[in-house]
Image (tube, rainbow, N blue to C red):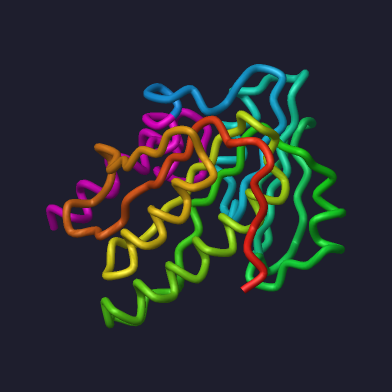
Amino acid sequence: MKSRKWHDAYTARARKQGYPARSVFKLQEIQQRYGVLKKGGRILDLGCAPGSWLAFASRAVGQQGSVVGVDVSPVTMTLPENVRFIHHDVLRWDRAFLEALNGPFDAVLSDMAPSTSGNKFVDAQRSLGLCEAALEISIKVLRPGGAFVCKIFHGTDFKEFSDRAKQFFERLAHVRPMSTRKASKEIFVVGLNKKRATTASND
């Protein structure tokens, strides 16, 4: 099958480079275009399993930097020395969780995606919920000037989410990486240069 061949090509390439999943190439492209990961930076990776983005971010920031990964599923790969994993459901974040993260961070990444139901509307709504949680957390823990990278399924609420994110960053970009499946509705919202004195709503 052509789709399987496409999948295997990216998967094989990822494994050859030492990454557990082909999703690494999406972050790699975003990094090449926007430089969201800096040497010596502190990175938060939400929904980090199986660990490709953790590994890529670890290499990008170097030994002087650090990465914190969060996921409701365990990460079974061997973690680099500059990576710490927290087992937690991002949708259930609270003050104690934020304190455990030990921020602030220079970039917050989210490649989170819901379990698909086959219903495009339901899947888009579930994706939106994860994205809203990622944005709220990023507002709390990002340094001024920090970056935000978030995957979302393009649906009826995409513009509303994008407009909300735009309030907190000097620049906002929309990216559909070349390694994204043609049939996929996913797109990445990239927020650059977090504004100072921004707070999340309590609504």
- Specify whether residue 103 is painted magenta: no
Q: Residue at x 54, y 45 (%)?
A: 168
Query: Which residue lies at the image location 40% right of the left edge and 43% below the top edge?
Result: 22
Q: Which residues are magenta?
A: 1-30
Q: Quadrant of residue 125?
A: bottom left
Please state which of residues 62 and 39 is positioned toward the viewer in this rendering: 39
Q: Quadrant of the C terminus?
A: bottom right
Q: Looking at the picture, how far across and down is residue 128, in whole percent?
A: 44, 68
Q: Is residue 119 left or right of residue 144?
A: left
- 21 above or below 17? below
Asked if 143 appears above or below 96 in the picture, the reply is above
Residue under the image location 24 percent in, 58 percent down? 184
Is 109 on the left or on the right of 98, as rendered? Answer: left
> Which quadrant of the structure image shows residue 44?
top right
Picture coordinates of residue 127 (x, y %)? 43, 68
Along the viewing direction, whichever of 116 and 37 lies nearer the viewer:
37
- The quarter in which the N terminus is drawn is bottom left
Q: What residue appears at the point 65 percent right and 30 percent down from the top-left corner?
A: 58
